[in-house]
Amino acid sequence: MAFNVISKTVMKSLFSKPATAMYPVIKNEFYPNTRGSIEMAHIDNCTFCGICSKRCPADAIAVDRAEKRWEIDRIRCIACSFCVQLCPKNCLSAERQYTAPMTDKSHKLFTIYGQVVSQEDASQEDVSQEDA
Amino acid sequence: MGERTIIPFGPQHPVLPEPLHLDLILEDEKVVGAVPSIGFVHRGLEKLVEKRDFNEMIYVIERICGICSFIHSQGYAQTIEGLMGVEIPARVKYLRTIWGELSRIHSHLLWLGLMADAYGFESLFMHCWRVREKILDIFEETTGGRVIFSVCKVGGLWKDIDNETLKRIVTVLKDVEKETKKMADVFTRDYTVQKRTRGVGVITYQEAIDLGAVGPTLRGSGVVQDMRTLGYAAYGDLVFEPIVEKDGDCYARTIVRVREISQSFDLIYQAINKIPDGEIDVKVKGNPNGEFLTRLEQPRGQVVYYAKGNGTKYLDRFRVRTPTFANIPPLLKMLPGADLADVPVLALSIDPCISCTER
Ligand code: SF4
Ligand code: SF4
């Protein structure tokens, strides 16, 4: 039995840089693989087939073919990337950055419209955020 | 003889990261009995198989636990693959082994830290977790997640690790191994650590078998049992021996885990040396029909998966028997006769994972 086996490590860490990053000052770099938030990258390719919404294990995506609306609930989404891998048109992508924190749930839905059906809609909303 | 008092221990307790609840019956400072109750984090995940198809279900299953998430998804995939008679490519087996062993290292390092924290050794706790962080970085780089990987699927994997990256992982791991050795030294040699763990919570060879202990709790009592010897994934091609200690006390259980970390490093090096090139998935056709049972070795011990399919895309039944559930009876055996101050150390020595247990 020995006393204070850890003392060498403790001494070393006294004189070395901290193991943690100085977060807000030094920005955290994510890896290319990091599954942050799910984004609609190519809305023009989307056929609104609804595969992503049917297969999502968390029921986070809603797709409306008639309205050409694709909508994701950021709070429900568990960032599993299943939708990204399943989309036949490869229009979804998992971005590295996580979604921004929210103080209330009013911004949990992210909605995006495709090439809009009727003329009036086109003038109002192309990319819009909707209240829950 | 003193008067009897009942002290509730948990589900919210400073030393326990898990909602384990024990009613401790005390006579003065000595524990004479303990009544466990579980069910504080029950989420009904097994029932969800009736609502989510078998491909989606893997994302639910891996969320049973944040520590053995990969091994849960591996076990689920293995069960369904067995049920449907899918033969997976060799590269998948090796990659699953590598990620599984990395999970074991990070789980054991996490546990060593928590154990150190349980007897008040704060700096050791911090250092264990500092070392563990490098493993989490490897996970994030290769899978995209630090805790939940979502790389396993029925019939293979979503992501490959290219051979360049595997080589780089070996260099990173060599560093981590060196650092881990320093921490391991403290656990094996330090006077204060031994003072708290030696001779505490002894489970004999026979008791361990009778009470159905699994994993390091069982191997710490001298029983040679390790599910990896069944040869699932790539373990059949790798050389290793189950790690066993004789004493059956907290110290023995710590040593089993410390030695398992070095074993895992070795298994990863072996797997990276032998990994064949090839496909990372096969097409899965049809729906599961029939019954299947798989056993795997998690960091905490043996885990059992059972699945029953009915020919539709929804399973009839899916059941997980997690290692902590099996290790609660041995814990109750250890407690009587112990001091109240030793209870945290004893509870942690089985490495309780209550979210696994309750699902
Ligand atoms: S995102 Fe892809 S899967 Fe989803 S509706 Fe559009 S085309 Fe279909
Ligand atoms: S990442 Fe997973 S949970 Fe999130 S929207 Fe896609 S399928 Fe659903």
Image (tube, coloured by chain):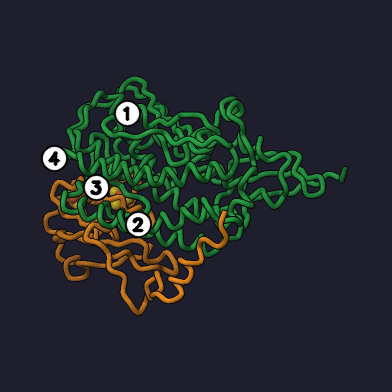
**Which residue in the structure is indicated by mark 4?**
B277
> Answer yes or no: do the residues labelled 2 and 4 have beta carbons within 8 Å?
no
Q: Nearer the viewer, residue B300 or A46?
A: B300
Q: Is mark 3 within 8 Å of ligand 1?
A: yes
Supply the letter of whichever chain is orange.
A
Q: Colour of chain B?
A: green
Give the secondary structure at mark 2: helix
Real-space Cα distance between discs 4 and 3? 31 Å
Q: Are marks 4 and 3 on the same chain?
A: no
Q: Is residue A128 left or right of residue B130?
A: left
Q: Amino acid at mark 2?
A: Val
Res. B176 mark: 2
Res. B231 mark: 1
Give the secondary structure at mark 3: helix
Q: Tell which residue pokes out farthest to the front in this image.
A: A1
Instruction: Give percent across and percent down for residue B203.
Output: 61, 34
Q: Amino acid at mark 1?
A: Gly
Q: Nearer the viewer, mark 1 or mark 2?
A: 2
**Residue shown at 30% from the left, 39% from the top:** B97
Within 10 Å of disc 3 (Cα), the crowding (few <14, some 14-19, many 20+) is many
Q: Quadrant of residue B315?
A: top left
> Answer yes or no: do the residues labelled 3 and 1 have beta carbons within 8 Å?
no
* Chain of the residue under label 1: B
Q: Amino acid at mark 4?
A: Asp
**Which residue in the structure is indicated by mark 3?**
A52
Real-space Cα distance between discs 3 and 1? 37 Å
Instruction: Give percent across and percent down for residue B346.
Output: 62, 45
First in sequence: mark 4 or mark 1?
Answer: 1
Give the secondary structure at mark 1: loop
Q: Amino acid at mark 3?
A: Cys
Q: Are marks 2 and 4 on the same chain?
A: yes
